[in-house]
Amino acid sequence: MKESVNIEGKPVSIETTRRAAHELQQRKTPLLAEMQLYFSCMIVKTVIFKEDGFDNMIAVSDSLHINFRPVVRGTCEFDKILEVPKIDMEVVHIENFVPKWLKIDYKRGDWVGEFGY
């Protein structure tokens, strides 16, 4: 399945594998996928999947909602990094950071996602 939505005025292409599309069709509530661009000691891209708890979601379909969130942690000390909560990063021109694509798969009972530019 291929879809497209706008985030911060920029188009984002969403592609799901056949397995993921099949699992999404079985859902009674939407899957929430948050693309996080994580700034700390290095930049990390990650996709977090949840059943609820994310804000500002954009509906791709009845069964899939997404959003994009730049985040930062206040430490680079590896042994403390999980203790320090993520906080939203203030970005002046967030549209410059919005990804161009998101790919979602369903493997061995888990949702898997990646995004890029």
Image (tube, helix red, strand yellow):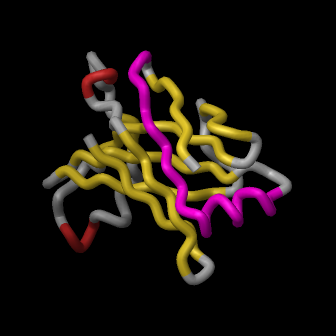
Residue at image point 65% right, 59% down: 21
Q: How many marks?
A: 0
Q: Please state the horizontal and vertical placement of residue 53, each as a whole percent of the image.
A: 66, 47
Residue at image point 66% right, 34% down: 59
Q: Please state the horizontal and vertical placement of residue 57, each as a whole percent of the image.
A: 61, 34
Along the horizontal axis of the image, is 5 left or right of 94?
A: right
| Residue 13 is a magenta residue | yes
Q: Please state the horizontal and vertical placement of residue 5, each as a whole percent of the image.
A: 53, 29
Extreme right residue here?
Answer: 28
In this rendering, the answer to whether 110 lies above or below 43 is below
Residue at image point 32% right, 45% down: 37
Q: Quadrant where the C terminus lies?
A: top left
Along the horizontal axis of the image, is 38 left or right of 26?
A: left
Residue at image point 34% right, 37% down: 99
| Residue 86 is a magenta residue | no
The range drawn in magenta is 9-27
